[in-house]
């Protein structure tokens, strides 16, 4: 886990990664649903695809950051 500081707020990177993964799952489902339609709206489909690519890039960045950060273990005294 890494702490992400955005403005004056701190966020747990694991929690952010989970939320981004939920966004990715939602977008994949929406894209699949649209593609099954007889005449999918190409503008909406492209918008969802761009949103998906953006979320995937963010998740990759978050996971890379976690892989490069040593894990700290705190033991009770």
Image (cartoon, rainbow, N blue to C red):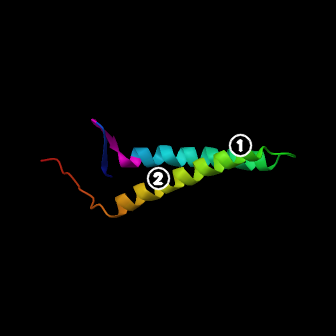
Image side of residue 41 versus residue 18, left or right:
right
Nearer-N-terminus badge (1/2): 1
Q: Nearer the viewer, residue 1 or 51?
A: 51
Q: Nearer the viewer, residue 53 or 42?
A: 42
The CA distance from mark 1 to mark 2 is 21 Å
| Magenta stretch holds residue 33 | no
Residue under label 1: 44
Q: Secondary structure at mark 2?
A: helix
Rendering coords of residue 24 (x, y %) = 58, 49
- Could you tell me which residue is drawn at 72 percent across and 44 percent down? 43
Rendering coords of residue 22 (x, y %) = 55, 45
Image side of residue 35 versus residue 74, left or right:
right
Circle 1 crowding by C-alpha within 10 Å: few under 14, some 14–19, many from 20: few
**Comparing marks 1 and 2, which lies closer to the viewer?**
1
Q: Which mark is residue 58?
A: 2
* In the image, farthest residue toward the right: 38
Image side of residue 14 versus residue 9, left or right:
right
Rendering coords of residue 63 (x, y %) = 42, 58
Q: Report which quarter residue 71 is drawn in.
A: bottom left
Q: Which residues are magenta?
A: 8-14
- Could you tell me which residue is drawn at 47 percent across and 47 percent down? 18
* In the image, farthest residue toward the front: 43
Image side of residue 6 versus residue 19, left or right:
left
């Amino acid at each position: 886990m890494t702490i992400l500081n955005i403005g004056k707020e701190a966020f747990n990177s694991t929690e952010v990664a989970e939320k981004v993964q939920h966004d990715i799952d939602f977008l994949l489902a929406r894209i699949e649903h649209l593609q099954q339609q007889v005449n999918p709206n190409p503008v909406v489909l492209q918008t969802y695809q761009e949103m998906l690519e953006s979320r995937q890039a963010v998740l990759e960045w978050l996971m890379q950051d976690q892989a490069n950060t040593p894990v700290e273990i705190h033991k009770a005294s």
